[in-house]
Image: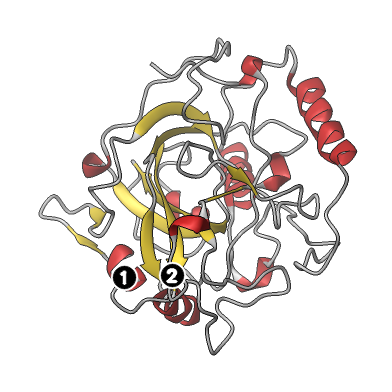
Amino acid sequence: MKNHSIAMAIAMAASLMLAAPAVAHDGHHEGAHTGGHASHAPVADKVIAEQREALARNTAGKGFGPQSPRDIDAVEGNNPRIFSAAPASTQMSLCNIHFHKNAEHKAKDFSIYAGNGNGHGYQSGYRYDTSHLSKAELAPTEHKVCDSAHSTLRPGDTIEVHYVYSTAQVTPGPTLGSCLSKAINNPQLRVEAQVYVLVNDRHAASFKDLTQYGKAASGLYQATGIPNNTGTPVQYAGSTTGPGYNEKGSPFQVTWSVRPHVAKVNIATVGKWCEKNDFDENHGHGVRNLVKNPDILSRIN
């Protein structure tokens, strides 16, 4: 049992891992082989269709639980697997913060398809309508922001931030391996998700403030800067995400709380955060294809 538990923990940490510099492919193989820089031509619709077909084939009748990401405005789902919702985030401990370039989830406020991308999660996902932004907010920055082999952030870009919580006794840190402990290899997980649009405006919200965290009187680490004015979060049963699961089901259960409205954030402060943060994050991660197959979606109540 000891060896099995260790193997399980290692497998989970590897599958969930995000953004450590030594694993620049985010532990999900996103863009690891093709690079996927914005200058690369997007893959054809056929590639995404084949990935969806493979996901359906590889999950059919095999007992996978509900998957993520999804359109949070669409409530239908037929997946029969049931698991208990994670406690409120105030009863859990923050373990990781990371962000994806473009939103993984879809909602009315972030419903513009960014395109098929490179087939490995980059340059895909959903965007906010930048026609609502001013010319000044969209003005180019003097320096590259969160630049990587896969993407560079620019004013008008959309990001989805994941504030990840665990029921294990943990300290916030790099990768989602920080959500595990030697004492508990199968903690309950909750993700508080918030979509932001990047603006060139020093008066907009600071990403430093939005990602602040501290230890509460309960002894649990809490993110203290998540906006409280972006709508009632849509809670649903899902899974871990990332493009490594475009063709296979994620076996990990996650309770999601996704806020339906977008907040503006000063792009310069996001750039500063990418330069130094407690989570070793330095770029926006790729996204998993939106899950549309009702057989692997839960019903949103």
Q: Mark 2 = which residue? A: 199
At label 2, the amino acid type is Val
Compare marks 2 and 1 and give the one earlier in the sequence: 2
| Residue 78, quarter of the rendered image | top right
Of 150 and 248, the residue lying toward us: 150
Q: Position of residue 49 (x, y in %)?
A: 83, 32
Q: Position of residue 247 (x, y in %)?
A: 78, 35
Relative to 283, say whether 272 is above or below: below
Q: Quadrant of the C terminus?
A: top left
Q: Position of residue 81 (x, y in %)?
A: 54, 14
Indicate the amino acid at tag 1: Ala
Q: Of 58 and 103, which appears nearest the observer?
A: 103
Q: Colour mode?
A: secondary structure
Q: Secondary structure at mark 1?
A: loop
- Image marks 2 and 1: residues in contact by CB distance under 8 Å: yes
- Going by the image, does 182 lie left or right of 148? left
Quadrant in which residue 245 is drawn? top right
Name the outermost residue toward the bottom: 142
Seen in the picture, residue 64 relative to 176 is either above or below; the reply is above
Q: CA distance from mark 2 to mark 1?
A: 7 Å
According to the picture, the residue beneath numbered tag 1 turns out to be 204
Q: Is residue 51 above or below residue 277?
A: above
Q: Residue at x 45, y 60 (%)?
A: 197
In this picture, residue 83 sits left or right of residue 150: left
Residue beneath the point at 58% across and 71% down: 153
Q: Quadrant of the N terminus?
A: top right
Disc 2 is placed on an element classified as: strand
Q: Position of residue 277 (x, y in %)?
A: 42, 75
Asked if one can make out residue 238 in the rendered structure from this viewpoint, the answer is yes
Residue located farthest toward the left when viewing the structure as drawn: 217
**What crowding class fits label 2: few (fewer than 14 Cα within 10 Å), some (14-19), or many (20 or more)?**
many
